[in-house]
């Protein structure tokens, strides 16, 4: 605790000494627990295009006799090797055959060890904790029992790791052009009666790995893997990999409930953080515009890990697959003052979720990264009810302005409010922008409320009070300004509150943000709606009809709650319940950096990812998320205040179809120093107006031509030359290079673009 206080100064001490009060709701009767929607995966078929299928198409791969046909429909044939539970799937629409391991190769002659051969060929593997040590096991190990039941559209196999006393069911079925792999939550059973008893040699579940070599290949001349990192990326399936390496990242971000709080070391190196994975998908293209597949982690995604391995790392195959966390160790501290005194702790019951993976097979013009995005969008429409909610097309594109109205910082008399933009200042700045030719502005107020220790709703007298706020909102309405209020129910700042969740180690759920040099505390998601219910009357009485919700990109975690383990699956349900609550009250909700499970619940997307992590093995960054949502949701950029290369950033906005965003204050940016917005280092219109004019006018010249239309194709013509096609027939050709470009018909200046 002492180390933490040294990091963010005496602000917490003063809060404690001065007795600054936090006002809380009556939460004594709020019990943890929410019904998790049962996955109805069988109600959806993503690839239902049967017209073009030719049942007489010959298979591209000979199917060995040891694989028996167990199901067939108009689009697919499913083959099973019972000993390994391995699969082969023939796509009757193009004759291409997919397999869960390379059936054409003798693995012994290839020099693989028996352990690696088992891992390659086995349909399912388990990583277990052998007391404390992780150990990988496969269904080809000794003393593993498999009992099959054949179904009309596939099969069910009950798998029992007898020695480890762990069993579960695996159900594999065909649905149209989709392959479904399902492990029901109720079938997962650790049946050792002495598990967790003192002195017992515990073997417990850690991770489930399902078909890790499905679609794996040594190389494909015109193939690549679509990785969901950040905005999206691709890795070519080259005969020699660009880099021999692997990559693993959690879907929706790391589960911080298992992690210790890392006390920063100022002597350490500053590293660029990796981009998050916000969509539970990946793609494998074996033959561009002929054969590919989209893989969706449909259920259990918040416990899924995405994994990529290049060829020649562990095997001679490129791999792309999901694994699923059922249990993870954490540090159980034995001392309040010495964090080195700890033992490993384990939750007694594994995480409960239905594990469902969907393989959508792609043919012809869908067999590329655009098709991967569009088929996932189709899935969201059919499964989650994704609907179009783009803004009405106007003369000019939208631009987003976030105003930081109030923060808190240490003053001469203790913690003090820091007014950074009064209501009247915001009105005056917006009026100045309108007079400068801006239209279609999207404005948000962001206010730190001291007695709530976070960004909540209240009308503050030192910002102008009720009259000034009403006058400003009336002005916005008369000028057709879209207005929303920023709320963050997911976290508090500086100190824990009664809303704060507990990590698995029973400590307060604190997270350190190096860019802000402060701690925030994650709220227990069971309080989200409690907080919303407390605000709803004030929001309605102030005529707030739209909200901008922040902090939700970090809100999925496993945590401890009075003897109950709260899961990230339940966290998803609490978050969807929050957005549904506001929408039922007639208040629209837009979300900052949302994860895909919220796409169907939100109005607009703020802080849309515009880059991948630029990992060394990646061959290109692609607009995977814009391809999914263009024409369906308005997308806005991260703050362009801090862009380091304006020409590059403007082209990226145009390429991705994303509208620019800026954050502003009416007062000096210096006032933000040592606040929760301390990472904002330029925010005054006086210093940003030229940059804002450039971004708005140049991006408007391009995107006004396609506003409201769907991006239907994206093509890397050659290095640095990108062509984007929209549903209204318009094409935008961009040149990222430092030299002019000409293809004989079109000429583009360096760092320029043309509309076709």
Image (tube, rainbow, N blue to C red):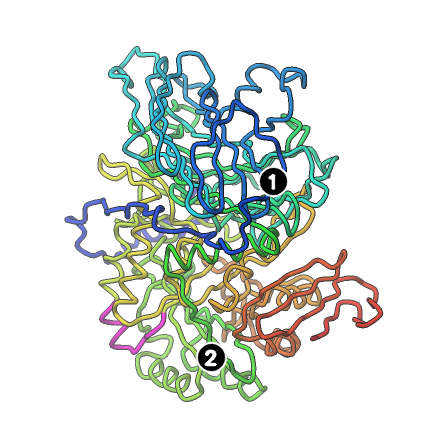
Which residue in the rendered view is the most extreme toward the left? 29
Tell me which segment is drawn in magenta: 536-546
Residue 327: say if magenta.
Answer: no
Q: Where is residue 539 in the image (x, y as percent from the top left)?
A: 28, 72
Q: Which element type, helix, strand or loop, lies under badge 2?
A: loop
User: In the image, is residue 513 above or below residue 681?
Assistant: above
Q: In which quarter of the image is the N terminus?
A: top left
User: In the image, is residue 622 above or below residue 670?
Assistant: above
Residue 93 located left or right of residue 138: right
Q: Residue 58 carries which label?
A: 1
Q: Position of residue 531 (x, y in %)?
A: 26, 59
Q: Where is residue 565 in the image (x, y as percent from the top left)?
A: 28, 36
> What residue is pinned by disc 2?
392
Instruction: Say which of 754 and 374 sits in front.
Output: 374
Q: Distance between the residues labelled 2 and 1?
A: 49 Å
Can residue 51 be seen?
Answer: yes
Residue 685 located left or right of residue 207: right
Q: In terms of sequence position, does the residue under pointer 2 or pointer 1 come before the other?
A: 1
Which quadrant of the view contains residue 552?
A: bottom left
User: In the image, is residue 154 above or below residue 613?
Assistant: above
Can residue 6 be seen?
Answer: no
Q: Residue 460 carries which label?
A: none
Which quadrant of the view contains residue 700?
A: bottom right
Q: Which element type, helix, strand or loop, lies under badge 1?
A: loop
């Amino acid at each position: 605790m002492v180390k933490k206080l040294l990091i963010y100064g005496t602000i917490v001490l003063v809060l404690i000494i001065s007795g600054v009060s936090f006002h809380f709701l009556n939460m004594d009767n709020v019990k943890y627990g929410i019904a998790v929607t049962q996955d109805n995966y069988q109600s959806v078929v993503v690839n239902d295009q049967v017209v073009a299928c030719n049942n007489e198409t010959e298979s591209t791969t000979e199917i060995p006799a040891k694989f028996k046909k167990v199901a067939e429909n108009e689009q697919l044939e499913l083959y099973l090797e019972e000993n390994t539970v391995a699969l082969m799937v023939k796509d009757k629409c193009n004759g291409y055959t997919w397999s869960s391991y390379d059936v054409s190769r003798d693995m012994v002659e290839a020099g693989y060890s028996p352990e690696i051969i088992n891992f390659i060929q086995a349909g399912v593997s388990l990583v277990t904790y052998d007391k404390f040590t992780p150990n990988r096991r496969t269904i080809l190990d000794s003393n593993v029992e498999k009992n099959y039941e054949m179904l009309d559209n596939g099969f069910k196999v009950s798998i029992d790791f007898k020695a480890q006393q762990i069993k579960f069911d695996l159900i594999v079925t065909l649905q149209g052009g989709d392959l479904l792999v399902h492990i029901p939550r109720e079938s997962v059973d650790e049946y050792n009666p002495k598990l967790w008893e003192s002195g017992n040699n515990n073997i417990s579940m850690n991770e489930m790995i399902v078909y890790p070599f499905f679609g794996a290949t040594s190389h494909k001349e015109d193939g690549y893997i679509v990785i969901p990192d950040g905005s999206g990326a691709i890795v070519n399936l080259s005969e020699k990999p660009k880099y021999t390496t692997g990559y693993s990242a959690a879907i929706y971000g790391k589960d911080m409930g298992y992690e210790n709080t890392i006390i920063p070391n100022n002597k350490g190196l500053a590293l660029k953080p990796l981009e998050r994975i916000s969509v539970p998908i990946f793609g494998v293209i074996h033959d561009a515009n002929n054969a590919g597949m989209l893989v969706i982690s449909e259920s259990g995604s918040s416990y899924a890990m995405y994994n990529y391995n290049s060829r020649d790392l562990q095997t001679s195959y490129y791999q792309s697959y999901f694994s699923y966390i059922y249990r993870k160790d954490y540090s159980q501290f034995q001392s309040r003052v010495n964090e080195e005194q700890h033992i490993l702790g384990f939750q007694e019951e594994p995480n409960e979720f239905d594990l469902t993976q969907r393989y959508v097979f792609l043919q012809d013009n869908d067999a590329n990264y655009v098709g991967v995005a569009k088929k996932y969008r189709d899935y969201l429409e059919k499964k989650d009810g994704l609907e179009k909610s783009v803004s009405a097309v106007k003369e000019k594109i939208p631009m987003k302005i976030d105003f930081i109205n109030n923060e808190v910082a240490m003053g001469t008399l203790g913690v003090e409010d820091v007014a950074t933009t009064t209501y009247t200042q915001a009105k005056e700045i917006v009026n100045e922008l309108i007079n400068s030719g801006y239209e279609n502005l999207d404005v948000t107020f962001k206010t730190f409320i001291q007695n709530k220790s976070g960004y909540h709703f209240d009308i503050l007298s030192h910002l102008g009070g009720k009259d000034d706020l009403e006058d400003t909102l009336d002005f916005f309405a008369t000028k057709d300004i879209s207005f929303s209020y920023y709320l963050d129910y997911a976290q508090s700042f500086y100190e824990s509150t009664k809303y704060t969740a507990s990590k698995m180690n029973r400590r307060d759920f604190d997270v350190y943000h190096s860019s802000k040099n402060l701690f925030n505390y994650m709220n227990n998601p069971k309080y989200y709606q409690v907080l919303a219910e407390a605000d709803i009357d004030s929001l309605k009485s102030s005529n707030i009809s739209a909200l901008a919700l922040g902090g939700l990109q970090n809100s999925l975690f496993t945590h401890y709650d009075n003897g109950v383990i709260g899961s990230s699956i339940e966290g998803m349900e609490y978050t969807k319940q929050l957005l549904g609550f506001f929408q039922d009250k007639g208040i629209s909700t837009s979300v900052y950096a949302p994860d895909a499970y919220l796409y169907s619940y939100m109005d607009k997307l703020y802080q849309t990812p515009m880059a991948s992590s630029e990992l060394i093995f990646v061959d290109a960054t692609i607009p995977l998320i814009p391809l999914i949502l263009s024409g369906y949701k308005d997308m806005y950029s991260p703050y362009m205040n801090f862009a380091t290369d304006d020409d590059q950033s403007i082209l990226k906005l145009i390429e991705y179809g994303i509208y620019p965003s800026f954050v502003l204050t009416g007062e000096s940016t210096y006032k933000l120093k040592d606040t929760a917005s301390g990472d904002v280092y330029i925010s005054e219109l006086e210093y940003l107006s030229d940059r804002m004019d450039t971004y708005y006018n140049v991006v408007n010249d391009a995107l006004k031509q396609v506003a409201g239309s769907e991006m239907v194709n994206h093509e890397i013509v050659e290095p640095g030359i990108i062509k984007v096609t929209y549903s209204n027939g318009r094409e935008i050709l961009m040149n990222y290079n430092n030299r002019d470009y000409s293809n004989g018909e079109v000429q583009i200046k360096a760092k320029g673009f043309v509309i076709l």
